[in-house]
Image (tube, grey):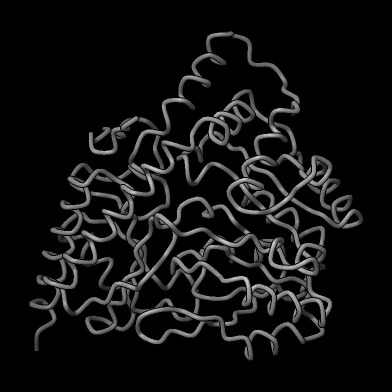
Amino acid sequence: MSYDFETPVNRRGTNSLKWDVKENELPMWVADMDLMTAPEITEALTARAAHGIFGYSVIPDEWYDAYIDRWREYHGLVMRRGELCFCSGVIPAISSIIRRLTCPAENVVIMTPVYNIFFNCILNNGRNALESPLIYDGKSYFADLEDLEKKLALPQTTLLLLCNPHNPVGKIWDAQTLQKIGEMCEKHGVTVLSDEIHCDITDPGKDYVPFASASELCRRISVTCISPTKAFNLAGIQTSAVFVSNDAMRRRIWRGLNNDEIAEPNAFAVQAAVAAFKYGGDWLDELREHIYRNKNKAFAFIVSKLPQIKPVSSEATYLLWLDCRDIERDGGELAEYIRKSTGLYLSDGKAYGRGGHGFLRMNIACPSSTLADGLNRLLDGVESYLEHTKD
């Protein structure tokens, strides 16, 4: 079956966070897609809506089976029903888990530049966001294991918040690196909380390694947050799962999710997840091909027309991480200028912590015509900025 990823969909006037912008603006910032979800999911939600009653919901066996079967078949991680907890979203889960597994003023380590909302989850709960900057060689990113261990060894450090695959740099962590991280965390009594929401958006032929599958030790000391929302463009449905193998840890987390009142599904949460994982596989394969084509088009355009910008090589996510430091070291001024002069709205790299200054993040999960519009606006904005800042 061939799915349509090329017909633009008008999202203005739909209460879209992404598209709540001026008429002339093109938002390519927040990580949701300008692509319709799999029709199999829409059919399941339409059938649920047709019932006409939207009372309280329970979690049926098919919800557990959908996650268990998907992760066993596609990602090599064996999960059991009793190890899964429903949550209304990955970010609510992360915030709740931080409150349960750490104390105020303790350190939560993050490997930066990293998803900016991680800072909110940590700081809003009165914990310290302790950055361990990644190593950037001008082309790709790597974990600085020496620096990471120093941060993990601090007596105030109790949690590592891992992004796997890594947003915004698009890194798929290999099993050896994950094993080493697990060993260091176990050595220093640190729990790993792994956000794996981007796991299904990898380049064709590539797969990610779940942290809990890297070793038995990694499985024992970790908590994993997973969801269909990123890969199937379902963020507004609010549905996710928390996987915890360690019985004692899971009891604490389950209690926290329930105390925070984020452990009950809305009327569409179960149907969306089940349809995505059971029936959305073909759509997802074609989506990954589409995103990969967009990535290649964007790289070719930038390399040929914008040599001042270096797109960072990636294997996952639909987000381009653009090194603009040859134009402007801070990044915020450039992002603001491009938006004001062309309407192209990109994410300022500073929001992602140390190492993000001078970078921009661009969402390319869109029809190719939208991508072309965004790239041309980027070109116009950069050329205008260079002329504007000329001595």
Q: In this view, does 52 lie to the left or right of 341?
A: right
Residue 338 as seen in the image, left or right of residue 332: left
Q: Residue at x 39, y 71 (%)?
A: 349
Q: Position of residue 230 (x, y in %)?
A: 49, 46
- Residue 314 point in image, percent of width and height: 39, 68
Image quadrant of residue 362?
bottom left
**Residue 181 location, x and y as percent?**
69, 77
Q: Which residue is drawn at 25% across and 43% down?
A: 367
> Residue 42: x and y, percent?
46, 24
Q: Residue at the location (33% across, 78% down)?
A: 358
Q: In which quarter of the image is the N terminus?
A: top left
26, above or below 157, in the image:
above
Nearest the eye: 108 or 272:
272
Please give left or right for residue 102 compared with residue 27 in the image: right
Residue drawn where x is 75% and y is 56% of the image: 97
Residue 62 vs 68, above or below: the answer is above
Q: Quadrant of residue 334?
A: bottom left
Who is closer to the viewer here, 81 or 147?
81
Instruction: Tell me the quadrant of the picture where the C terminus can be found.
Output: bottom left
Q: How many circles with numbers are drawn on the protein? A: 0
